[in-house]
């Protein structure tokens, strides 16, 4: 019975960490938020995020498509990984506000070209220069991101984190809870 309580306490602690997400730039003075450890093939040795960092972002980010999820139809990348928008960004702006620790938890959706492939997405898809100088994909002017806590296609663990991160509908509208 004691191991059940310990397991429940550990699970509750991980949930709190996952919900911490990335807040506003004003919160940078506080302790940085931690992403939950995801189940990856990387051991994550020495990585406080269990191997979930920007280098673990899905490789097939160049395409956007529509998929059914527990939230309804949402926008995903070519591998089915959910993409998110961040309320602290400026819609239609030319830059992301997610830098540093935020970018480690919320890696940018990037592409190799200025015209990513699109299937079923009816909102306006474009690009901006990302914080690392790469090409970041936008939807209806919102820079797009992955969540380090999503381990598999169809995961929507980033939805509503810190009341600032949201999945997008096929027409590019945020799907707030």
Image (spheres, helix red, strand yellow):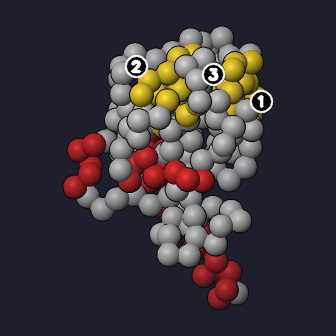
Instruction: Measure the C-alpha gap from mark 3 to mark 1.
Output: 21 Å
Instruction: Measure the C-alpha gap from mark 2 to mark 3.
Output: 19 Å
| Residue ID for mark 2 | 91
- Residue 98 visible from this viewpoint: yes
Instruction: Give the mark nearest the N terminus, 2 or 3.
Output: 2
Q: From the viewer's perspective, is residue 164 above or below residue 66?
A: below
| Residue ID for mark 1 | 68
Residue 121 versus residue 2: which sits nearer the camera? 121
Residue found at x 38% / y 32% = 96
Q: Position of residue 123 (x, y in %)?
A: 60, 12
Q: Is residue 165 left or right of residue 51?
A: left
Residue found at x 46% / y 17% = 141
Instruction: Give the mark nearest the N terminus, 2 or 1.
Output: 1
Q: From the viewer's perspective, is residue 170 above or below residue 134?
A: above
Q: Position of residue 76 (x, y in %)?
A: 68, 31
User: CB under 8 Å between callouts 2 and 1?
Assistant: no
Numbered disc 2: secondary structure: loop
Numbered disc 3: secondary structure: loop
- Residue 149 visible from this viewpoint: no
Numbered disc 1: secondary structure: strand
Q: Position of residue 164 (x, y in %)?
A: 43, 37
Q: Is residue 100 left or right of residue 2?
A: left
Q: Position of residue 134 (x, y in %)?
A: 47, 34
Q: Mark 2 against mark 1, which lies toward the viewer? A: 2
Residue 68 versus residue 119: which sits nearer the camera? 119
Q: Is residue 124 left or right of residue 28?
A: right
Instruction: Give the mark nearest the N terminus, 3 or 1.
Output: 1
| Residue ID for mark 3 | 116
**Mark 2 closeness class: few <14, some 14–19, many ≥20 residues within 10 Å:** some
Residue found at x 63% / y 61% = 38
Image quarter where the N terminus lies is bottom right
């Amino acid at each position: 019975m004691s191991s059940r309580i310990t397991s429940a306490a550990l699970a509750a602690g991980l949930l709190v960490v996952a919900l911490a997400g990335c807040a506003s730039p004003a919160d940078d003075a506080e302790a940085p938020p931690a992403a939950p450890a995801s189940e990856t093939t990387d051991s994550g040795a020495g990585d406080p995020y269990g191997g979930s960092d920007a280098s673990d972002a899905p490789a097939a980010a160049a395409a956007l498509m529509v998929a059914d999820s527990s939230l309804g139809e949402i926008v995903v990348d070519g591998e089915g990984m959910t993409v998110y928008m961040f309320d602290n960004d400026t819609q239609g702006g030319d830059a992301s506000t997610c830098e540093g620790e935020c970018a480690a938890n919320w890696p940018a959706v990037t592409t190799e070209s200025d015209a990513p492939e699109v299937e079923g997405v009816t909102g306006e898809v474009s690009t901006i220069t990302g914080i690392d100088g790469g090409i970041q994909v936008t939807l209806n002017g919102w820079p797009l991101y992955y969540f380090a806590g999503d381990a598999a296609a169809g995961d929507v663990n980033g939805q509503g984190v810190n009341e600032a991160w949201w999945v997008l509908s096929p027409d590019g509208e945020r799907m707030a809870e």
